[in-house]
Amino acid sequence: MNDLDQLVLSAQGEFATAATPAELENAKARFLGKAGRVTELLKGMAALSPEEKKSRGAEINLVKQRIENALTARRQALADAELEAQLKAEALDVTLPGRQRGTGALHPITRAMERIEAIFGSMGFEVADGPEIETDWFSFTALNNPENHPARSMQDTFYVDMKDEQGSWYNLRPHTSPMQIRYAQAHARKYAGQEHMPDIRVIAPGRTYRVDSDATHSPMFHQVEGLWVGENVSFKDLKAVYVNFMQQFFETTDMEIRFRPSYFPFTEPSAEIDMMFGSGPLKGRWLEVSGSGQVHPQVIRNMGLDPERYIGFAFGSGIDRLAMLRYGVNDLRQFFDGDLRFLSQFK
């Protein structure tokens, strides 16, 4: 075996022991680099005769080619080994079930709101929706709230940095009562001049805003206001409608409902509505669920109607509180925290 064959075997041996691409490149430099052993052989040809250069050059070029082939083969072997290791690390078990897209569900407040709309719809009430940024007139004045009423305070109501045509600040509506006024006014205009006007029967569910936050209050909450105005609507109708609603909403007649005298500027007489379940954890506890009363004559007048001819009742209930009672939730904030562990219970 001559020195050139020995050089090829030496290169093949070093290439075979290179465990990484970096080690292989270092081995390549020792044989094919600028100071490598093959390069040194080529430099040594300067002292040879022309005939010797021809034969020796052909031999060295053949050796160089054999070394380069060995280098290429080792590079491919290292690349294949790396790919195989990567495939093993990222191996897929095709017998596993596929990933499924999770199914969503209606929010419990949305469920409660839709239930409320369906129940009152069955009693002939329409559903009204309107702006959440309201004028002072619709939020307070039209509802017979005097200018010095505490509800107009910035400690109770969120105001918007914008004024209406009368120079009053706009506000985030503190209740959905403005929709009662808007709906009744549109109804009165529609039947103006006619001998008979159909009864106004409407509920206004939606978001409302007040400066309040604790376990049972939120700065943003949901409310449903109800209104029934006609020529012969009494407090007895209020009681019948609301008791029927409560029994359908909670799907039970095992409850007591009382109307407790109270005061609101927009109704006269006024009453708080309390309820008590006949069984379960809330048995024996009275819980306030709504404010109500016969619509004040001035509010009827602000609707564009004659209070000497038309009379009616109104009520306002917190949808969030009704949902808490229906689903057994003791902290209002859980509805709005976005915790899927809590919300997934209502799928």
Image (tube, rainbow, N blue to C red):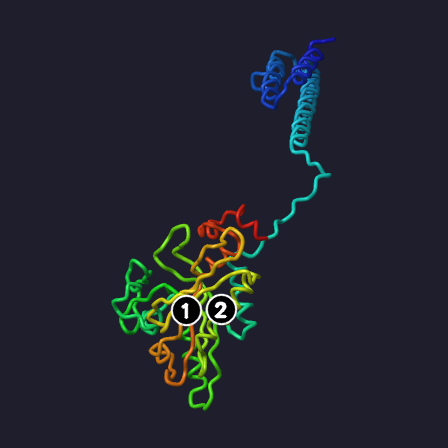
Residue 293, how many percent across, how many down? 40, 71
Tell me if residue 9 can be seen: yes
Residue 229, how many percent across, how many down? 44, 78
Give left or right: position of 180 versus 31. Answer: left
Q: Quadrant of residue 53?
A: top right
Q: Residue at x 68, y 18 (%)?
A: 16
- Whether pointer 1 and pointer 2 mark residues with C-beta atoms closer than 8 Å, the reply is yes
Q: Residue at x 44, y 62 (%)?
A: 274
Q: Residue at x 40, y 55 (%)?
A: 218
Q: Quadrant of residue 232?
A: bottom left
| Sequence-first tag of 1 and 2 | 2
Q: Residue at x 48, y 81 (%)?
A: 199
- Quadrant location, the N terminus: top right
Considering depth in this image, is 328 or 114 the residue closer to the camera? 328
Give left or right: position of 123 versus 148. Answer: right
Does 124 appear above or below 219? below
Measure the C-alpha gap from mark 1 to mark 2.
10 Å
Q: Quadrant of residue 309?
A: bottom left
Q: Give the secondary structure at mark 1.
A: strand
Query: Which residue is identified by label 1?
Result: 292
